[in-house]
Amino acid sequence: MTVLFSDIRNFTRLSEAMTPTENFEFLNSYLKNVTPIIRTHHGFIDKYIGDAIMALFPDKAVDALEAAVALLRQVGVYNTGRKSAGYVPIRIGIGLHRGDVILGTIGEEHRMETTVIADAVNVASRMEGLTKVFGVDLLVSGGVVDALPKGHGIPLRHLGAVKAKGKTQSVEIYECYSNDAPQLLAHKEQSKALFSQAMGEFRKGMFLTAGKMFARVAELSKLDAPAAYFRDACSLSIVRPRSAEPWDGAEVVEVK
């Protein structure tokens, strides 16, 4: 099962500028625009959590990835209408993870709901949270990437392994940048080999070498947020050595 989490960025700030009625109208307008895409790609909504969507794709991993790409594209269309009506555009983050889940019913006799429970759900939620950390729109776990068919054609960039603070297991993560602006997309394609080399050095603990490589990538485009993130992470690792525990190549991040 592939789990998709999406969330509207800065929704609290947006909602504070609206009345309760306007909040409901906005959310319903947004959901009406984006949720049909999930069904079109063979998924279904598990639940809405405020402005967040949790969706499940029981069949192919590529269904979930293509749905996520289409969701981001549709938000662009939706924003065109918002801007023409005098509203600020919105931005969403999406996280995908694939793993085993258990479908069941929770609650008590007066209030029950059917949902899935598993660590895969928590990982997918953290993947969405990591989009804010790395400044990207869509992050995909290694579990999803491993299940994609060869030649799927969706551009991905490996961002290494991350470990949520307090967790022992790391997760391989990939950025999907197919919805980036054309100039940024071209930059990521052209600098992909250098970024990959830098990531290899980073995972070996060669922070000085990796930092110089990431800096070169970041200099090519000031909008490449992951390159800037890892450039700065390397600098911090040089001036403030990491813990005494052996370096396992996984970046430890603060994420809910």
Image (cartoon, rainbow, N blue to C red):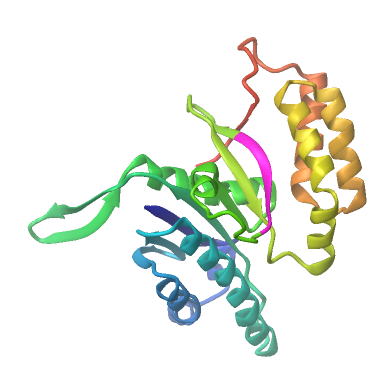
Q: Exactly how many numbered labels are in the figure?
A: 0
2 or 208: nearer the viewer: 2
Q: Which residues are magenta?
A: 155-161
Q: Which residue sits at x=81%, y=43%?
A: 193
- Residue 90, given in percent of the width and then of the height, sits at 62, 71
In this rendering, position of residue 209 left or right of residue 162: right
Residue 37 lies in the magenta stretch: no
User: Residue 51, relative to residue 102: is it above or below?
Assistant: below
User: Residue 154, relative to residue 247: is it above or below?
Assistant: below
User: Residue 111, relative to residue 163: is it above or below?
Assistant: below
In this rendering, position of residue 1 left or right of residue 4: left
- Residue 202, given in percent of the width and then of the height, sits at 75, 28
User: Residue 170, relative to residue 141: is it above or below?
Assistant: above
- Residue 214, given in percent of the width and then of the height, sits at 84, 38
Q: Which residue sits at x=77%, y=19%?
A: 240
Q: Residue furthest top?
A: 244
- Residue 253, given in percent of the width and then of the height, sits at 60, 34
